[in-house]
Image (spheres, rainbow, N blue to C red):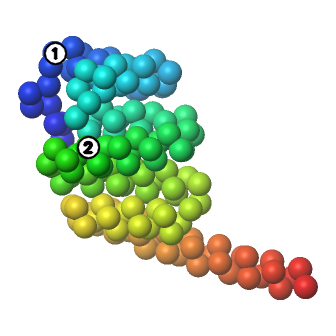
Amino acid sequence: MCACINISQPALAAKEKGNHHYKKKEFNEALAAYTEAIALEPTNITFLNNRAAVHLMMKNYDKCIQDCKDAIKIGRENKADFELIAKTFDRMGNCYQKQKMWSEAMKCWEDANMENYTKATDRKIKQAKLEAKKTSRRRLHQSREGR
């Protein structure tokens, strides 16, 4: 779903340029294009969410999380669609997942489901719970071996 209603032509063109570069895995160029779109339309969370996706692909996890937090804040201030906010929470959860930060990932995905429930997100939550248990067991086992 695109929040493309009432978007200026220059901002839309920058977004499309970013999408083009993203598909070609030209991430630095995609970042520049999405940043341009954000500068032109700072209240459009889709542009921040797209830039967050690039940061995730580039393993710039802190920047991805910050863009997601900014997008959620701006989205709520501007009454963005629940699905867009849920998508942003989902992306932030994916970022935490890549870092094996299971409790943070679960929280984001639970927030995503509060905005807009999906079975796919529910499955992510269940998988994260399993991974968190495995991690906890490993740590317990390692601490017992270290005695």
Kind of element beneath mark 2:
helix
**Residue farthest to the right, as pictured:** 147
- What separation in Å lies between label 2 and label 1 (alpha carbons)? 21 Å
Local crowd size for mark 1, using a 10 Å CA cut-off: few (<14), some (14–19), many (≥20): few
Q: Nearer the viewer, residue 38 or 103?
A: 38
Residue in the picture at 26% in, 43% down: 74
Residue in the picture at 38% in, 46% down: 68
Give the residue pinned by disc 1: 9
Local crowd size for mark 2, using a 10 Å CA cut-off: few (<14), some (14–19), many (≥20): some
Q: Position of residue 24 (x, y in %)?
A: 44, 22
Q: Is residue 64 left or right of residue 40?
A: right
Q: Quadrant of residue 109?
A: bottom left
Q: Position of residue 10 (x, y in %)?
A: 21, 14
Give the residue pinned by disc 2: 74
Kind of element beneath mark 1:
helix
* Amino acid at circle 2: Ile
Q: Quadrant of residue 114?
A: bottom left
Q: Quadrant of residue 36?
A: top left
Residue in the picture at 9% in, 27% down: 6
Q: Position of residue 90 (x, y in %)?
A: 36, 54
Q: Which callout, 2 or 1, points to the residue nearer the camera?
A: 2
Does residue 20 appear anywhere in the picture? no
* Amino acid at circle 1: Gln
Q: Which mark is residue 119?
A: none
Does residue 111 appear anywhere in the picture? yes
Q: In the rendered view, would you say 131 is above or below 5? A: below
Q: Position of residue 132 (x, y in %)?
A: 57, 73
Which badge, 2 or 1, is on the more N-terminal residue? 1
